[in-house]
């Protein structure tokens, strides 16, 4: 799953200024870390649904994504 996220999904996300990282995969729950533009995206749930569909289509697995948003540290600086 990690390789799939890194080679198939991440490059497509980066095309929109986002950044996704594999965190863990247990019992059908895929935890992904979203950074860059993804960390503040208002439609992240749609992106997660798209990733779930891509995994189902390509890997034949039903999964659920747990999304973690991590914004850059400098966004907290005044």
Image (tube, rainbow, N blue to C red):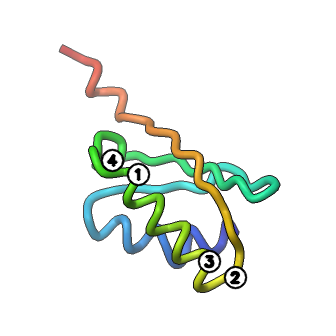
Earlier sequence position, callout 1 versus callout 3: 1
Q: Mark 3 and mark 4: span between their CA atoms? A: 26 Å
Neighbor class of circle 1 (other Cα within 10 Å; few <14, some 14-19, many 20+) is few
Q: Residue 9: image x %, image y %?
A: 48, 72
Q: Nearer the viewer, residue 53 or 4?
A: 53
Task: State how many labels appear.
Answer: 4
Residue matched to label 1: 45
Q: Are marks 4 and 1 in contact (CB under 8 Å)?
A: no
The label on residue 56 is: 3
Q: Residue 77: image x %, image y %?
A: 24, 17
Q: Residue 37: image x %, image y %?
A: 28, 49
Q: Mark 2 and mark 4: span between their CA atoms? A: 29 Å
Q: Mark 1 and mark 2: span between their CA atoms? A: 21 Å
Residue in the image at 60% along x and 75% along y: 55
**Up-down: is 70 above or below 10?**
above
Question: Which of the image's four quarters has the C terminus?
Answer: top left
| Image side of residue 25 versus residue 50, left or right | right
Q: Secondary structure at mark 3?
A: helix
Residue matched to label 2: 60
């Amino acid at each position: 799953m990690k390789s799939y996220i890194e080679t198939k999904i991440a490059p497509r996300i980066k095309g929109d200024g986002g950044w996704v990282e594999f965190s863990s995969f247990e019992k059908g729950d895929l935890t992904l870390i979203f950074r860059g533009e993804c960390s503040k995206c208002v439609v992240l749930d749609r992106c997660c649904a798209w990733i779930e569909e891509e995994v189902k289509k390509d890997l034949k697995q039903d999964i659920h994504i747990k999304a973690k948003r991590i914004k850059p540290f400098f966004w907290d600086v005044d």
